[in-house]
Amino acid sequence: MFNLTGYLHVAMLEVGPWIYKVLTFVLMFASGLLLNLILKRHANIATETRFYIILLFLVLPFNIARVALIDFPYTLCYFLFFPCMAADGSLPCFGAGTLLFEL
């Protein structure tokens, strides 16, 4: 059986345990930026309101266990949700012409 998370952990531990923290920060911050793109599409949300929503999203500990190494696959999946929603607003987004397909 293919265990993707096991291979992910082995590859990341080859680099070192610090890579988990760096990638968790980068992915969570990128999720906030993508949420900003999603909220920009809604004209009824003011710029100041959008700023405070993104600020709370980035600061509040929605995923309180994000510091644990074993929770990195959940952080990765959490991040992958936001490019899908930013691409065209619907899921799944792995088809041709979408953001993840072009990456």
Image: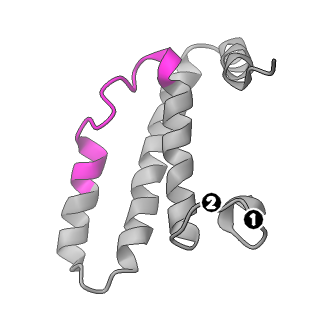
Q: Decide: marks 1, 2 in contact (CB < 8 A)?
A: yes
Is residue 69 highlighted in magenta? yes
Quadrant in which the C terminus appears: bottom right
Image position of 56 with respect to 37: above or below: above
Q: Could you tell me which residue is drawn at 76 percent across and 64 percent down?
A: 102
Which contiguous range is marked in magenta? 55-71
Task: Judge by depth and name the residue closer to the eye, 81 or 32.
Answer: 81
Left or right position of 101 against 59: right
Image position of 95 with respect to 47: above or below: above
Q: Return the x and y of residue 10 as percentages of the image width and height.
A: 71, 13
Q: Which mark is residue 92?
A: 2
In the picture of the structure, the residue carrying the numbered disc 1 is 95
Quadrant in which the N terminus appears: top right
Q: Which quadrant of the figure has residue 63? A: top left
Dot 1 alpha-carbon crowd within 10 angstroms: few under 14, some 14 to 19, many 20 or more: few
Left or right position of 16 against 58: right
Q: Which mark is residue 33?
A: none
Helix, strand or loop at label 2? It is: loop
Q: What residue type is labelled 2?
A: Pro
Q: Return the x and y of residue 53 as percentages of the image width and height.
A: 23, 60
Q: Could you tell me which residue is drawn at 39 percent across and 54 percent down?
A: 32
Dot 2 alpha-carbon crowd within 10 angstroms: few under 14, some 14 to 19, many 20 or more: few
Q: Return the x and y of residue 92 as percentages of the image width and height.
A: 62, 60
Q: Return the x and y of residue 54 as percentages of the image width and height.
A: 28, 58
Q: Distance between the residues labelled 1 and 2?
A: 8 Å
